[in-house]
Amino acid sequence: MVPSPSPSARTATRPAFARWMGTTNQVTRTFLSAGAIPGLINLGGGLPDPKIFPTGRLAEFARRAVAEHPGEALGYGPIEGLAPLRDAIARRFSSAALPLTRANVLVTTSGMQGLDLIGKVLLDEGGLIAGQFPTYLGALDAWRPRAPSFRNLVLDAPGFDPQEALAGAQFAYAVPNFSNPTGRLVDLATRRALVAAAHRTGTWLVEDDPYGTLHYDGATLPRLIELSAQAAPGEPYAGPVIYMGTLSKEIAPGLRVGWIVAAPEMIEALTLAKQGSDLCTSGVTQRVALAAIETGLVDEIQPALVALYRSRRDALCAALATHLCDWFDWEVPVGGMFVWALARDPALDTDALLPHALAAGICYSPSSVFDATGANRRGMRLNFTLNPPERLDEGMRRLATAVAACRGGRQVA
């Protein structure tokens, strides 16, 4: 009888497996599993408040989907997504300069699947990604199995040259509206420069936009795909921008419905990749998403959602000012779900701080997980949408206690 190879031997013969396991960040596991700690105040995830989910309306949409469209809801469906939903998404994002049809739309099983499919289609083993920095953790996880190299795009850095930054990359990745993790809004001049560089270099530019409707202050800015369409206004879109969106932040993340809007040939390639991924997105949730869009539910709940989250953003920033202003700097984001806080003292390592924070009953996302190398350890991402103001204030009080413990018992003013 031939003995089975040991786990270490099996790993050694599978370089991709070994590489994946070797790059899994233990800190990521810690904060993702922290929700099981009793009494924990969780500011670590990008979590909407379940209390605002329109449960009654969604339940009725689901009932009607099964009762009135049993074949579509419960059977296998088109890989690209249900045609009526693709049409609705195309209408939602169309403009005079950007006329879209269902040929421009792929329905995905959440935004995360979109990131995975883009990696499968565009990224060679060891290829170069030009990514907005700090970078969304989910994107890093989606592409890490292909062992890419990363060129960090610090979009607000003095002298940033988009054309030089994109040159040679297999694709570029940006979250221009209230970036995850920093919450920043990319200004119009930088948006125009990024799009122009993508057109000149021929580099695909991925625009990830899960937070665009969570805009609290100031004027909205055009999407990158809208700016790209201005190169050939009114013509069928065939530019280099790949636009991604989701209903997770607008309605409920459990629907797991997202979309990609792009040139038809890119949609065709991504559809082939999706075929080998999940074959098709749930017909029930697609029908629910379609009803939420067509009945106006998405637009109907936005004012209350924005008002609630704006008040919680203000509460978190006020709590930071009360409890942590001696140790951290931050900006008040004009939208999104996150505040990005940076330690003034370079020696304050937020990976090292995290166990103290968990012991004090508070969880955040350390900045290392938003860096492909794990080297950025001065910051933290704080979510404000899940918890009410009193919990946010208590969370910052607990975090101040954790900072004091981490720094050897020094008290925070």
Image: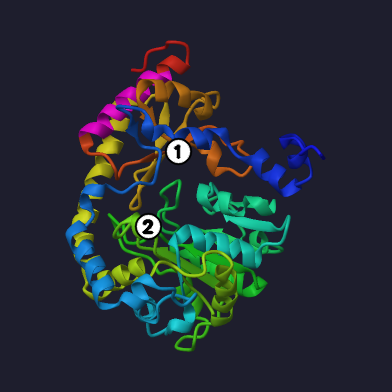
Mark 1 neighbour density, 10 Å: few (under 14) some (14–19) many (20 or more): some
| Residue appearing at x 53%, y 43% in the figure | 370
Residue 203 visible in the shown view: yes
Residue corresponding to mark 2:
211
Looking at the picture, tell me which residue is in the foreground, 223 or 47: 47
Q: Is mark 1 on a helix, strand or loop?
A: helix
**Is 217 left or right of 6, judged from the image as shown?**
left
Q: How far apart are marks 1 and 2 (CA)?
A: 21 Å
Mark 1–mark 2 contact, CB under 8 Å?
no
Q: Which of marks 1 and 2 is nearer the N terminus?
A: 1
Q: What's the mark number on residue 304?
A: none
Residue corresponding to mark 1:
32
Above-or-below relation of 6 to 232: above
Type of amino acid under label 1: Leu
**Is 144 left or right of 311, judged from the image as shown?**
right
Identify the image quadrant of the C terminus.
top left
